[in-house]
């Protein structure tokens, strides 16, 4: 992965990511058939947010200020999410 801060986010990458997300969500929803949970938004956000934070932290070598800037959140919010997901330097280093 190239340095996240030095790369402009192209619309092509955005379209590719959106396509992958749509396909994955369609497959996920198909598993529920007629019984879709009422907290679907929360389930999806939690599934996406944790690996996103892990990858960004790994990319910036655990620098929370840099990670917060890349993620577009303040450092206190990032710190709360790190604790919420139980992320440590060791768990982040093991992330793919």
Image (cartoon, rainbow, N blue to C red):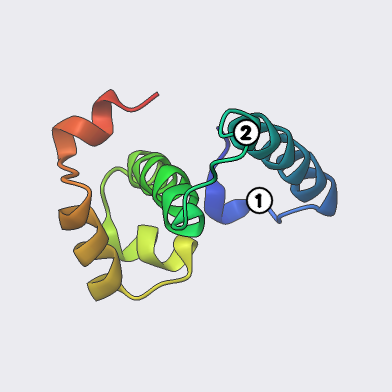
Identify the residue shown where x is 75% and y is 50%.
14
Q: Position of residue 38 (x, y in %)?
A: 47, 57
Disc 2 is placed on an element classified as loop
Indicate whether 94 appears above or below 65.
Answer: above
Q: Quadrant of residue 1?
A: top right
Q: Position of residue 9 (x, y in %)?
A: 71, 55
Q: Is residue 18 left or right of residue 7?
A: right
Residues marked 1 and 2 touching at CB (< 8 Å): no
N-terminal-most mark, 1 or 2? 1
| Cα–Cα span, label 1 and label 2 | 40 Å
Disc 1 is placed on an element classified as loop
Indicate whether 24 appears above or below 52.
Answer: above
Disc 1 packing (10 Å; few <14; some 14–19; many ≥20) = few
Q: Is residue 7 left or right of residue 12?
A: left
Q: Nearer the viewer, mark 1 or mark 2?
A: 2
Q: Position of residue 3 (x, y in %)?
A: 53, 43
Residue picked out by circle 1: 7
Q: Quadrant of residue 77?
A: bottom left
How many numbered marks are there?
A: 2
Residue picked out by circle 2: 33
Q: Nearer the viewer, residue 22 or 53?
A: 22
Identify the residue shown where x is 17% and y is 39%.
89
């Amino acid at each position: 992965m190239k340095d996240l801060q030095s790369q402009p986010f192209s619309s092509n990458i955005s379209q590719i990511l959106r396509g992958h997300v749509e396909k994955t969500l369609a497959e996920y929803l198909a598993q529920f058939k007629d019984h879709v949970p009422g907290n679907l938004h929360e389930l999806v956000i939690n599934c996406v947010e944790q690996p996103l934070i892990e990858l960004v932290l790994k990319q910036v070598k655990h620098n929370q200020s840099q990670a917060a800037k890349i993620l577009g959140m303040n450092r206190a919010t990032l710190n709360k999410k790190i604790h919420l997901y139980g992320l440590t330097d060791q768990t982040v280093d093991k992330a793919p």
